[in-house]
Image (cartoon, grey):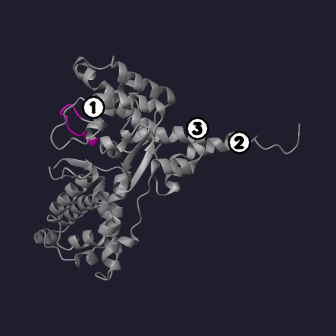
């Protein structure tokens, strides 16, 4: 395991977790996961497994005969389910009990994702001629109301980084740790804000993945695709300061390669970075819910504002489809189009 990359280790952990989840599902679900393995990531398959667990729990609650079957639900049950049953499932998703009997409330986007999982599940067995009916294909996807994209303004970015350096608004307890982590925190947040990389790409960064001569980092995108992303001289300065500090730390065994270390001398987790961003961001902009992904949106907005090149933004952010990028930065595109209305002169004044 020591010679594997962070992402390879995560894949192994995900495979083990998926095996455990599959044991809780009807036996034919294992065929589905094997069938989609070549076109999905382990993380995606785990998400499907969680969604299917909710679906079959709904069926058990809705039908006493299915409840008696336990895990031994036959594949033929899928054909007996009607579109009305699936619409009831969508309603169930709005608010349903978890395994700990606490209510789970799903957003529109959460419901849409879970319905998409069921559609993919049905499509697999229908495409492979193992069922003759596909009621999920008749199910209409829930309407998704687009939300305003939350991001930091230019002055808020500066205030955020100032707060990381100074820490004057932190609680007394937080200040006790601030002196030990501020160099690392400044490097980490500067890298997120200065490159737009995902939080998983950030925590997966190894020492040998950073090249200060070319101001580049090697990261692994979704699906394990390797890419090189470049950072500014401003980011390089704070990264180099942390790199010097990092070399003085003796890592916990098994974490020797990690670039960003926690106070426990272990590779930082996604959750710890999320908490880090939340801690500083709410001191600067308490009305905005800022996450690492919002820092990614902030970078994308800034890059598009400066270059006007949507294809460049898509490439740097690692979007496979430029339409994904365009959807997120449509407001900026419209603003640029308006600003260009007087750019072309028909007659000399």
Q: Nearer the viewer, residue 68 or 158?
A: 158
Q: Secondary structure at mark 1?
A: helix
Residue at 28% of width from left, 34% of height from top? 275
Check disc 1 and report the residue beneath it.
Answer: 246
Check disc 3 and report the residue beneath it.
Answer: 306
Task: Answer with left or right where residue 54 lies relative to residue 150.
Answer: left
- The image position of residue 60, as x and y in percent, is 17, 65
- The image position of residue 339, as x and y in percent, is 68, 39
Which label belongs to residue 207?
A: none
Q: Secondary structure at mark 2?
A: loop
Check disc 2 and report the residue beneath it.
Answer: 340
Q: Nearer the viewer, residue 301 or 243?
A: 243
Label 3: how many residues lie within 10 Å, few (<14), some (14-19) or many (20+)? Answer: few
Alpha-carbon distance for marks 2 and 1?
Answer: 48 Å
Q: Nearer the viewer, residue 286 or 314?
A: 314
Q: Secondary structure at mark 3?
A: helix
Task: Answer with left or right where residue 166 lies relative to residue 266.
Answer: right
Quadrant of the snapshot with the C terminus = top right
Q: Is residue 263 magenta?
A: yes
Q: Nearer the viewer, residue 100 or 270?
A: 270
Question: What are the residue bounds of the magenta stretch?
Answer: 262-270
Residue at 34% of width from left, 56% of height from top? 224
Name above or below for residue 128 compared with residue 179. Answer: below
């Amino acid at each position: 395991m020591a010679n594997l990359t962070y992402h390879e280790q995560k894949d192994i952990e995900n495979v083990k977790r998926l095996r455990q989840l599959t044991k809780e599902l009807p036996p034919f679900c294992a065929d589905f996961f094997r069938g989609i393995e070549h076109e999905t990531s382990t993380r995606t398959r785990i998400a499907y497994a969680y969604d299917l667990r909710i679906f079959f729990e709904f069926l058990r609650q809705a039908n006493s005969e299915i409840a008696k079957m336990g895990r031994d639900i036959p594949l033929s049950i899928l054909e007996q389910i009607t579109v009305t049953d699936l619409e009831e499932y969508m309603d169930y998703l709005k608010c349903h009990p978890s395994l700990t009997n606490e209510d789970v409330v799903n957003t529109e986007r959460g419901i849409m994702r879970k319905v998409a999982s069921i559609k993919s599940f049905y499509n697999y067995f229908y495409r492979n001629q193992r069922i003759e009916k596909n009621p999920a294909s008749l199910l209409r996807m829930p309407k998704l109301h687009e939300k305003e994209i939350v991001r930091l303004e230019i002055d808020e970015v500066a205030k955020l980084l100032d707060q990381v350096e100074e820490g004057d608004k932190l609680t007394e307890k937080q200040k006790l740790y601030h002196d030990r982590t501020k160099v690392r925190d400044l490097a980490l947040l500067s890298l997120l804000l200065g490159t737009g990389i995902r939080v998983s790409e950030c925590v997966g960064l190894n020492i040998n993945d950073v090249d200060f001569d070319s101001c580049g980092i090697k990261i692994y995108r979704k699906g394990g695709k390797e890419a090189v992303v470049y950072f500014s001289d401003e980011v390089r300065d704070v990264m180099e300061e942390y790199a010097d500090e990092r070399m003085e730390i003796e890592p916990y065994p098994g974490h020797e390669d990690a670039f960003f270390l926690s106070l426990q001398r272990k590779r930082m987790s996604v959750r710890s970075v999320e908490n880090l961003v939340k801690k500083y961001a709410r001191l600067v902009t308490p009305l905005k819910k800022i996450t690492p992904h919002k820092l990614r949106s902030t970078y994308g907005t800034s890059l598009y504002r400066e270059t006007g090149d949507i294809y460049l933004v898509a490439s740097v952010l690692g979007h496979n489809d430029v339409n994904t990028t365009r959807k997120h930065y449509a407001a900026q595109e419209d603003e640029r189009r308006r600003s260009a209305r007087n750019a072309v002169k028909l007659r000399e004044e």
